[in-house]
Amino acid sequence: MSKVLFVKTAEQKEWLIKLNQLKQSFQTFSKEVDEKSRFPKENIEALVNLGYTKLTLPKEYGGNGHGVYDMVLLQETIASFDSATGLSIGWHQGVVGELYGQKLWQEDHLQTFAKKINNGALVNRAASEVQTGSPTRGGKPTTTAVKKDGKWVITGRKSFTTMSPVLTHFLTSAWVEEKEGIGFFLIDRNSNGLSIDETWDVIAMRGTESHDLVLDGVEVPDVCFVEFNNGQRGNQINGWLLHIPACYLGIAQAARDYAVKYSTEYSPNSIKGTISDLPNVQNLIGQMDLELMKARHFLYSVAEAYDDTSRRPLLTNELGVAKHIATNSAITIVDLAMRLVGAKSLQRSNPLQRYYRDVRAGLHNPPMDNMTISKLAQTAISEFKN
């Protein structure tokens, strides 16, 4: 199923051409990245050299000023080449888009950090902790930030730090006791007391190397205090998180393409022609494309609405629903692809078994399915209570 319908500008088309030139090299590393749980540094380096990592940086800061819709289109494409690369670089793109789109930092600090992004800096949020679970559920961080001699001293441990081997900066959450709220601090990788504990040992998204970030009395200047949340920020939505469903939809596209291609080539001696001529196989292909079409149209329509500042205030639960639909459709699509290919899909040399494991990870990226459904119900009920 082609995404050509969703390509709206000449610049988007140009970037898709550029990215497709990397397809073969990205796919070359995928098997090794998964089996060895090795981060695809070559892929990230190629994207940095291509200028991709400054696309979501606004033009006034030296970037390309791409919006959420652009990001979704390109992130889905990269994830169809290699899932670990797609999810990893997606976090950087989303954090940069949010940081500058919502002006979370003082202007002079935004200008300074923009220069680093333009020179290849890579950033991701470090907010998850074992004790608190997902940060979207409102747990109080055990990581602390204490003001001492004009600097902030940060101590704690963060889990699920995706892209940890190559990140140059960590936008880290910590409990600020004197302010009674959660602060986010931009911490340079070379800071004293910062280390990476290689804890990542999972069966999905193995190549992301989402290890633990350890902060042992790390000192940062006051200018690195980026954002503060005392619980009064409100329900401001963040469309940049749509890089998550885009990633899993990209994996689903790869699984669908593999299965359809297989069906046009496999010809057992029990039939004439290939299995693509069989009604049951065509039914599986049709179901895959139906799921892709539903998820893609919803995801892209939500991204487009978010980019339109006049329509953005009208969005309520659509971002969470887009993630819910795309992730669950992706899981369904990979399952259908494996049913089509049969037992061969379980061979370790077959990419479908990797896609099968990787799409499951989407269930655990925010927001969780049960939170999305609960918010839908609460919104519906409130219409009649107010």
Image (cartoon, rainbow, N blue to C red):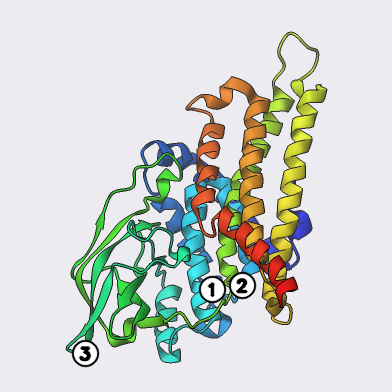
Residue displayed at 28% across by 69% down: 143
Q: Which labelled disc corresponds to residue 66?
A: 2
Of tags 3 and 1, the one toward the viewer is 3
**The C terminus lies in quadrant:** bottom right
- Residue placed under numbered mark 1 in the picture: 97
Of tags 3 and 2, the one toward the viewer is 3
Q: Are marks 1 and 2 in contact (CB under 8 Å)?
A: yes
Q: Amino acid at mark 1?
A: Gly
Q: Residues within 10 Å of mark 3 (few under 14, many from 20)?
A: few
Q: Between 50 and 271, which is closer to the camera in this rendering?
A: 271
Q: Between 55 and 229, which is closer to the camera in this rendering?
A: 229
Could you tell whether 135 is left or right of 220 in the image?
right
Residue displayed at 66% across by 59% down: 321
Q: Amino acid at mark 2?
A: His
Residue 74 visible in this rendered orientation of the protein: no
> Residue 9: x, y in percent?
74, 68
Could you tell whether 155 is left or right of 328 in the image?
left
- Residue placed under numbered mark 3 in the picture: 150
Res 35 → quadrant: top left
> Residue 368: x, y in percent?
54, 56
Measured in 3D between alpha carbons, the distance from the residue under mark 3 to the one under mark 2, in whole angstroms, is 37 Å
Whichever of labels 3 and 1 marks the residue nearer the N terminus, that label is 1
**The N terminus lies in quadrant:** top right
> Residue 167: x, y in percent?
36, 63
Location of residue 347 with respect to 241 vertically, above or below? above
Q: Amino acid at mark 3?
A: Gly
Q: Between 383 and 155, which is closer to the camera in this rendering?
A: 383
Location of residue 47 with respect to 346 vertically, above or below? below
Whichever of labels 3 and 2 marks the residue nearer the N terminus, that label is 2
Of tags 1 and 2, the one toward the viewer is 1
Find numbered disc 1 in the image and state the secondary structure of the residue it sits on. Answer: helix
